[in-house]
Amino acid sequence: MDDLSAIVLAGGKGTRIAGLYPDIPKPMIPAAGRPFLHWVTEWLVRRGVSDVVLSLGHKAEVIEDWAARRNAELKGRARLACLRESRPLGTGGAVIACLDSCRDWVLVMNGDSLLDAGIGPLFHRVQEAGLDGAIIGVDVPDASRFGSLTVGGDGLLRGFAEKRPGAGLINGGVYIFRKSIFDGFQRNEVMSMESDIFPALLAASASIVVDVCTGSFLDIGTPESVVLADEFVNILF
């Protein structure tokens, strides 16, 4: 996938779990003996992604030091580049800020979540169908913490529903985009992917297919989910 770059959003403070690991950013929380971000980058490398941009903010220097060691460990299989936010830009603003360092297609994912899904077939599907992008959705028994995706009968994304209890198809936090669809967005603006970027893209008639992941999913955003990380990683890898 020579025309694909990955942007990993790793700049958040992790407010809900800050008391557990106050001295490190959330993506560096240990899981199975390694920082969680190790497994995120390993997930990408094993799926053929060789160009990775880490979007950093809170305690960026901790991740920068780790990334230098990780690059040496990867021995050329992939390249990790670090890009610090000039100020907190939100998930959408962080993506826009990284685009100049990316190839023609961009895969976006969070530095604090993982799912059991492939990306190669989805990437080729998007390209061959002439779509603008894709989002991976995950079926969960309780969508109250995440909010749900609204999908049309054609399988394309229609929008995001408010958080509500009960089963639903949630945003898995992994996206594939044609980079050129972001040409109209301003750099250095605070934006959210769900509240700003996606609504603007859909209003402009962007075609974004929803791919449903039937595998497992973990977001280490709460103390309850952090304790599941070791087992999840050991099963996934």
Image (cartoon, grey):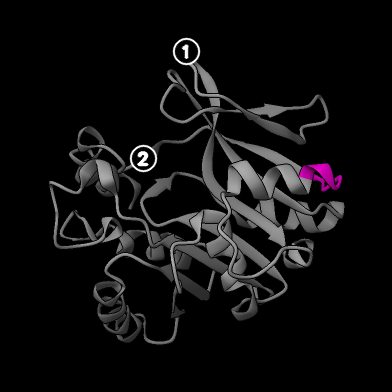
User: Residue 73: where, in percent of width, then height?
Assistant: 30, 81
* Residue 205 included in the magenta stretch of the image: yes
User: Which residue is drawn at the image coordinates 31% and 84% (left, top)?
Assistant: 68
Residue located at (30% from left, 43% from top): 220
Q: Amino acid at mark 1?
A: Gly
Q: Say left or right for 134 vs 225.
A: right
Compare marks 1 and 2 and give the one earlier in the sequence.
1
Q: CA distance from mark 1 to mark 2?
A: 18 Å
Q: Secondary structure at mark 1?
A: loop
- In percent of the image, x 79 and y 64: which residue is there? 184
Disc 1 vs disc 2: which is toward the camera?
1
Q: Residues within 10 Å of mark 1 (few under 14, many from 20)?
A: few
- Where is residue 181 shown, x and y percent of the image? 78, 61
The residue carrying pointer 2 sits among few (fewer than 14), some (14 to 19) or many (20 or more) residues within 10 Å by Cα, namely some
Q: Look at the magenta stretch and give its main secondary structure.
A: loop
Indicate the position of residue 16 as horizontal and vertical percent values.
Answer: 25, 40
Please tell me whether residue 99 is drawn above or below residue 69 in the rendered image: above
Whether residue 62 is visible: yes
Identity of the residue drawn at 73% across and 57% down:
124
Q: Which residues are magenta?
A: 202-207
Residue beneath disc 1: 166
Q: Farthest residue to the top: give it.
A: 166
Q: Quadrant of the N terminus?
A: bottom right
Please provide percent x and percent y for residue 218: 36, 40
212 and 46: which is toward the camera: 212
Above or below 207: residue 101: below
Identify whether 62 is placed above or below 35: below
The type of residue carrying mark 2 is: Leu
- Left or right of 42 on screen, residue 211: right
Please determine whether, in this image, residue 84 is positioned above or below residue 180. below
Q: Which residue is mark 2?
A: 218
Image side of residue 14 versus residue 162, left or right:
left
